Amino acid sequence: MKIAVIAVQGAFREHIAALRQLGADAREAKWARDLEGVDGVVIPGGESTAIGKLMREYDMLEPVRELARAGKPIYGTCAGMIVLAKRIEGEDTVHLGLMDVTVRRNSFGRQRESFEADIDIPAIGAPPFPAVFIRAPHIVSVGEGVEVLATYEDRIVAVRQGNLLATSFHPELTDDYRLHQYFLNMAQAPVAH
């Protein structure tokens, strides 16, 4: 299983390490050519404006959209969730515009207010997942066909829409690989977007 992790900015190394722990051939993707022949894409946390800008500069937006249309899974964490969203509250510009959600930036506070919380995600089973929130967004609203996988304090923090997966938090900063395994399982059974 070949997984490209967008490596223009953010916590891409941690995602690669987690995916490799699960036996995936995870690699950095810095250019459009790095997306050829992959079975899925991860967009890491970091700074969504910077990630979106760099993906534009390196001509990566359309190749990722094409992979999504072909049914390949795309997983956005934290800033990656914002990059995937069709709507960003208070902004006119979106990046990939693939997932039918509206996101709110920095919903849980600034960097110094980062925290970890155990959240229930029935799709990956018990026990609760140790979610790490760092300047995390949350989803304000979802469109038809978007499945809410988890909430925290009445805010939507994990969703799936067909072959698209997004979380407000950083699973790559934990030793719990269940969300990465869930993503790899999606890659084994592609669903057209």
Image (cartoon, helix red, strand yellow):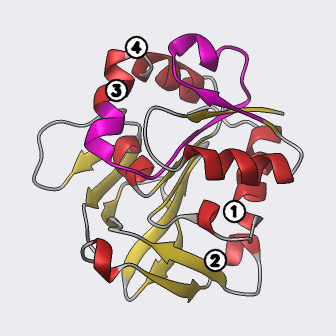
CB contact under 8 Å: marks 1 and 2:
yes
CB contact under 8 Å: marks 3 and 4:
no
Residue 6 horizontal/vertical position (percent): 53, 34
N-term-proximal mark, 1 vs 2: 2
Q: Is residue 180 above or below residue 85?
A: below
Is residue 15 part of the magenta span, yes or no?
Answer: no
Is residue 35 part of the magenta span, yes or no?
Answer: yes
Residue type (three-letter) at the residue carrying disc 2:
Ile
SS of the residue under disc 4: loop
Which residue is found at the position 41% from the left and 37% from the top?
98
Label 1 – label 2 distance at C-alpha? 9 Å
Residue designated by label 1? 179
Residue furthest right in the image: 23
CB contact under 8 Å: marks 2 and 3:
no
**Tag on residue 121?**
2
Label 3 – label 1 distance at C-alpha? 26 Å
N-term-proximal mark, 2 vs 4: 4
Residue designated by label 4? 59
SS of the residue under disc 2: loop
* Circle nearer the viewer, 3 or 4: 3
